[in-house]
Image (cartoon, helix red, strand yellow):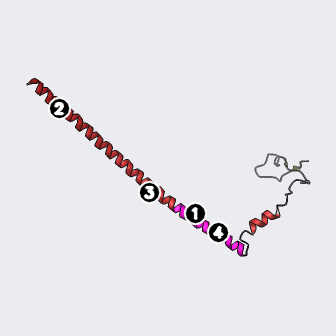
Amino acid sequence: ARCTVVRLPAHPLARPDGQRALMHAARPLSPGGAVGRRRPRCALRRAASVSLFGGGKQSKDLQLRVQTLEAEAAAREEARATLVTEHAELTAKVAKLDAESKRRLKRLEEAEREVFKLEKLVEEKDAKF
């Protein structure tokens, strides 16, 4: 393919000789046979996509089915959102109970240590007498 040289008109910010630089066009003079042609689309695919809800009993059945599926999807999404919030609440509650049980366990261990110390003191006093 041949490229053409195009001379552009003068521009205020042009070179001192008053002309802009010559540019080579990147495209050929004529598009040729294969350039710019598109294959025709399959008529069946185009017709199927255009007339999905075109008319007739079958199309109304399809519309009803789509509406039913959309309603089911919305109900499932709502149920999922409810379960997610319940899960978050229960997780927080379990964490709170876990922290509380750890505090109780610490108190019990401290009480056991105190009892052990007191028993030791009692044994030492009994041993002295």
Q: Secondary structure at mark 2?
A: helix
Where residue 49 sits: x, y (%)?
74, 65
Residue 60 is one of the magenta-drawn residues = yes
Per the rendered image, the range of residues in magenta is 55-78
Q: In the image, what residue occupies the spot 61% across and 68% down?
A: 68
Q: Which mark is residue 73?
A: 1
SS type, badge 1 = helix
Q: Secondary structure at mark 4?
A: helix
- Measured Cα–Cα span from mark 1 to mark 3: 20 Å
Give the mark count: 4
On residue 119, the disc is 2
User: Which amino acid is tagged 3?
Assistant: Glu
The residue identified by callout 3 is 86
Give the residue pinned by disc 4: 65
Mark 2 or mark 3: which comes first in sequence? 3
Identify which residue is drawn at 68% across, 70% down.
Answer: 62
* Mark earlier in primary sequence (2, 4): 4
